[in-house]
């Protein structure tokens, strides 16, 4: 075992801390994973890093050595005095005892001065992975990258290609806003207490412009979400039954785009969903005249 394991055990003993199951806490004890995560995040002395869920400060320690400033957002109040005491000599750390889902991240970033890039690093509890990532993407933050550890199964979904058998509705949002890549798989034995499943570090590089040009972004994601809610049905039946677009119009659009009428929503690519959305609004405009 490396230094992180020893540090973690000492901190848990000193502060008489036990992992909070309700918050999905598991403490990372693998040195190589921390090193790889920080390396891939590519942090410079001019960067602002927002760390979500620092816990005992395992990643925080390495981030503080490289970044201009680190803002650590931690929900568990028991962790706050540990972080304050552990890093009291560092003047580039700001600690917020907040739920990241309730934080105005854009406002937080705008308050910072002389920052080159903003990078987010997180070890997310499994139960809030999707809402946190969707929040970070949908708010269109001035962020360069998101380097995050998540459950392995979720990592595969987030980094899949749209239309692939591994994809879910969130895959489309990730591909729309980001370029994604897998970094390193993390065995469950790399944590204490040991979780039931393995994890993986992935990285999302935010695009300067969305991957596809779309007239109605909100409708695009409504269409995707609806088709995945009815994923056992064909795209025409699932979406048609929802009342968003009538089946006759859907069939005409699919025929125009050369897409099989029997296709399921989960087999459509992001580009095809964008084409369907744009075609639908073109038809609506035509009907007005």
Image (spheres, rainbow, N blue to C red):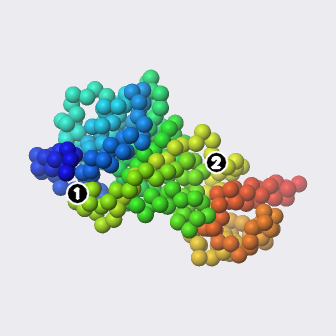
Residue at position x 28%, y 26% in the image = 91
- Residue 154 image point, x, y percent: 44, 61
Point out which mark residue 211 bears. 2
Query: In the visual, does 42 lie left or right of 159?
Result: left
Query: In the visual, does 244 lie left or right of 16?
Result: right
- Residue 235 image point, x, y percent: 67, 71
Identify whether 231 is placed above or below 106: below
Residue at the far top in the pictured view: 114
Figure quadrant of residue 126: bottom left
Residue at position x 65%, y 61% in the image = 269
Query: In the visual, does 106 lie left or right of 15?
Result: right
- Residue 39 image point, x, y percent: 38, 40
**Is there a contact, CB below 8 Å, between mark 2 and mark 1?**
no
**Crowdedness of circle 2 by 10 Å Cα count: few (<14), some, many (20+)?**
some
Marked residue nearer the N-terminal end (2 or 1): 1
Residue at position x 74%, y 73% in the image = 261
Identify whether 262 is placed above or below 103: below
Residue at the far right in the pictured view: 289
Return the residue at label 1: 192
- Residue 112 image point, x, y percent: 42, 28
Tell me the SS state at disc 2.
Answer: loop
């Amino acid at each position: 075992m490396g230094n992180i394991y020893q540090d973690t055990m000492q901190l848990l003993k000193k502060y008489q801390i036990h992992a909070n199951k309700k918050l999905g806490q598991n403490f990372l004890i693998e040195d190589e994973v921390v090193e790889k995560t920080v390396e891939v995040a590519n942090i410079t002395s001019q960067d602002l890093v927002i760390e979500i869920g620092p816990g005992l400060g395992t990643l925080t320690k390495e981030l503080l050595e490289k970044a201009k400033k680190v803002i650590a957002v931690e929900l568990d109040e028991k962790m706050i005095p540990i972080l304050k005491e552990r890093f009291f000599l560092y003047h580039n750390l700001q600690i917020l005892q907040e739920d990241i889902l309730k934080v105005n991240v854009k406002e937080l970033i705008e308050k910072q001065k002389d920052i080159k890039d903003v990078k987010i690093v997180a070890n997310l509890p499994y139960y809030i992975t999707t809402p946190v990532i969707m929040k970070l993407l949908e708010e269109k933050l001035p962020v360069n990258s998101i380097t995050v550890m998540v459950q392995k199964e979720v990592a595969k979904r987030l980094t899949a290609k749209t239309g692939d058998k591994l994809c879910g509705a969130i895959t489309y949002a990730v591909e729309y806003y980001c370029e994604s890549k897998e970094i390193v798989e993390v065995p469950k034995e790399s944590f204490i207490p040991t979780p039931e499943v393995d994890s993986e570090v992935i990285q999302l590089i935010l695009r300067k412009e969305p991957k596809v040009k779309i007239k109605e972004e909100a409708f695009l994601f409504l269409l995707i979400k609806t088709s995945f809610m009815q994923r056992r049905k064909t795209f025409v039946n699932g979406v048609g039954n929802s009342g968003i677009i009538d089946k006759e119009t859907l069939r005409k659009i699919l025929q125009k785009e050369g897409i099989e009428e029997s296709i399921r929503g989960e087999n459509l690519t992001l580009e095809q969903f964008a084409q369907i959305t744009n075609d639908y609004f073109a038809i609506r405009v035509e009907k007005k005249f």
